[in-house]
Image (spheres, grey):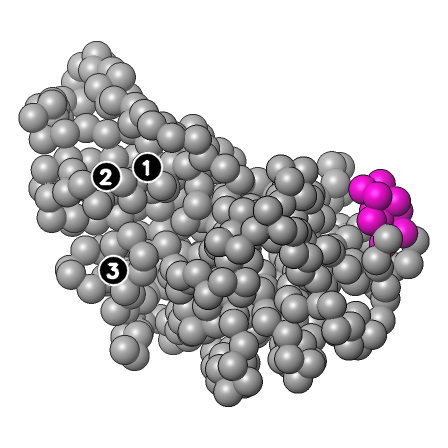
């Protein structure tokens, strides 16, 4: 089989997600597997690393035997052997870089959120469409093993009519004083584009939309629970961005979703994110990897009695959904889909239009929190 190279500019590769998930566990993993099989042969990703630090780029390139890296995004985009631009920068820098990539005639794949505002996201989508370019936004949660099992249950009619979805996401992010924070400090400053609503609600939009139905309304309460944190240099700073959001969504078809997102919660659940889905015929609890179910025919009959200690092993009454297949890394799976989309026009619907809807929902949730009311989502 013939091998065809495809140049990919990776901007923001020195960051945690850009390096670990997109370079190492996706593109380099595809190369280690011998390339990506396509109808016409094998597609071979050729990364061009872009970032602000020459030292960091050189170190990463040397570690993985790569030779192409630069701090000059314009020069990277001008290369005729580059077909795709990928962005994993901080959100504030993303729109300008994506515009530059579109002007250079490159297909664009990016981390979410696509832009800081829905207006800007729509403009990017329109520009790319007018230029005839293919676009994609990372929607990794859909490729998690637990949620793929959940999708299998939905497609098989396990739930009957779905009534509600309850989601719990988050963990305790250390303040940075007596233990280093496990997230960058810009996440907690509004001026730098931080905030959990804009970070997580684009995820919840595509997840709800694809699994349960489009979001028809949102009511959100957000908070800044920790108002002072310590940055990477050991200096205290005012944490001005929202670090928790509590949202209720009405979905097409009538189901109600409630999702709590927090960087100020200590985990008492099996995984960092879990969704409980309740339907007329059965229920499921899905996380990153596991999915457990309880069918209507096996549902016990609890009786409320606060005078006696509980003797019912509720967790033990649920059954594990088997894998039944090999689950690859979710970021890699979506990269493969986007590469096939670019190389052979393979099916792909996680585009800038989808990313724009995620940004719009986050904006409406922020508006709901400011105004203290339910906001309908324009269709």
User: In this picture, is 373 found above or below 221?
Assistant: below
- What span is colored magenta in the figure? 57-66
x and y, in percent, of residue 350 in the image: 43, 63
Residue extending farthest right: 55
Q: Mark 2 or mark 3: which comes first in sequence?
A: 2
Q: Is 184 in front, or is 368?
A: 184
Q: For residue 47: magenta?
A: no
The reply to whether callout 2 and callout 1 are in contact (CB within 8 Å) is: yes
Q: Secondary structure at mark 1?
A: helix
Please identify the quarter of the rendering in which residue 316 is found: top left
x and y, in percent, of residue 83 in the image: 65, 68
Going by the image, does 372 lie left or right of 213? right
- Where does label 1 land, which residue? 149
Q: Mark 1 or mark 3: which comes first in sequence?
A: 1
The residue located at (16%, 48%) in the rendering is 162
- Where does label 3 land, which residue? 213
User: In this picture, is 3 found above or below 356?
Assistant: above
Q: For residue 63: magenta?
A: yes
x and y, in percent, of residue 329 in the image: 53, 40
The residue located at (10%, 37%) in the rendering is 281
x and y, in percent, of residue 154 in the image: 22, 44
Q: Is residue 104 shown to the viewer in this render?
A: yes
Q: Residues within 10 Å of mark 1 (few under 14, many from 20)?
A: many
Q: Residues within 10 Å of mark 2 (few under 14, many from 20)?
A: some
Q: CA distance from mark 2 to mark 1?
A: 6 Å
The reply to whether callout 1 and callout 3 are in contact (CB within 8 Å) is: no
Q: Which mark is residue 153?
A: 2
> Looking at the rendering, in which quadrant would you find the C terminus?
bottom left
């Amino acid at each position: 089989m013939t091998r065809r190279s495809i140049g990919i500019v990776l901007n923001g590769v020195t960051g945690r997600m850009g390096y670990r998930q997109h370079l190492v566990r996706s593109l380099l993993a595809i190369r280690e597997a011998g390339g990506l099989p396509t109808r016409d042969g094998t597609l071979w990703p050729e990364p061009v690393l872009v970032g602000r630090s020459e030292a960091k780029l050189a170190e990463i390139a040397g570690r993985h035997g790569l030779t192409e890296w630069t701090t000059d995004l314009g020069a990277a985009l001008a290369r005729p052997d580059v077909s795709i631009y990928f962005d994993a920068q901080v959100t504030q820098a993303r729109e300008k870089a994506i515009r530059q990539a579109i002007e250079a005639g490159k297909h664009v794949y990016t981390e979410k959120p696509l832009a800081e505002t829905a207006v800007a996201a729509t403009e990017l989508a329109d520009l790319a469409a007018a230029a005839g370019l293919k676009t994609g936004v990372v929607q990794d949660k859909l490729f998690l093993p637990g949620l793929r099992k959940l999708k299998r249950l939905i497609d098989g009619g396990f739930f009957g009519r779905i009534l509600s979805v309850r989601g719990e996401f988050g963990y305790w992010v250390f303040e940075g004083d007596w233990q280093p924070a496990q997230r960058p400090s810009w996440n907690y400053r509004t001026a730098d584009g931080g905030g959990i609503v804009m970070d997580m609600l684009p995820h919840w939009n595509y997840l709800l939309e694809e699994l349960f139905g489009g979001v028809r309304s949102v009511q959100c309460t957000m908070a800044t629970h920790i108002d002072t944190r310590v940055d990477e240099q050991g200096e205290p700073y005012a944490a001005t961005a929202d670090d928790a959001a509590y949202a209720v969504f009405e979905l097409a078809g009538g189901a109600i979703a409630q999702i709590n997102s927090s960087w100020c919660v200590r985990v008492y659940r099996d995984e960092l994110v879990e969704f409980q889905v309740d339907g007329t015929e059965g229920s499921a609890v899905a996380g990153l990897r596991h999915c457990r179910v309880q069918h209507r025919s096996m549902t016990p009959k609890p009786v409320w009695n606060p005078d006696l200690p509980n003797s019912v092993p509720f967790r033990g009454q649920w059954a594990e959904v088997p894998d039944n297949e090999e689950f690859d890394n979710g970021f890699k799976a979506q990269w493969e889909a986007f590469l096939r989309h670019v190389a052979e026009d393979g099916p792909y619907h996680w585009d800038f239009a989808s990313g724009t809807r995620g940004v719009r929902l986050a904006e409406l949730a922020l508006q709901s929190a400011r105004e203290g009311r339910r906001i309908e989502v324009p269709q």
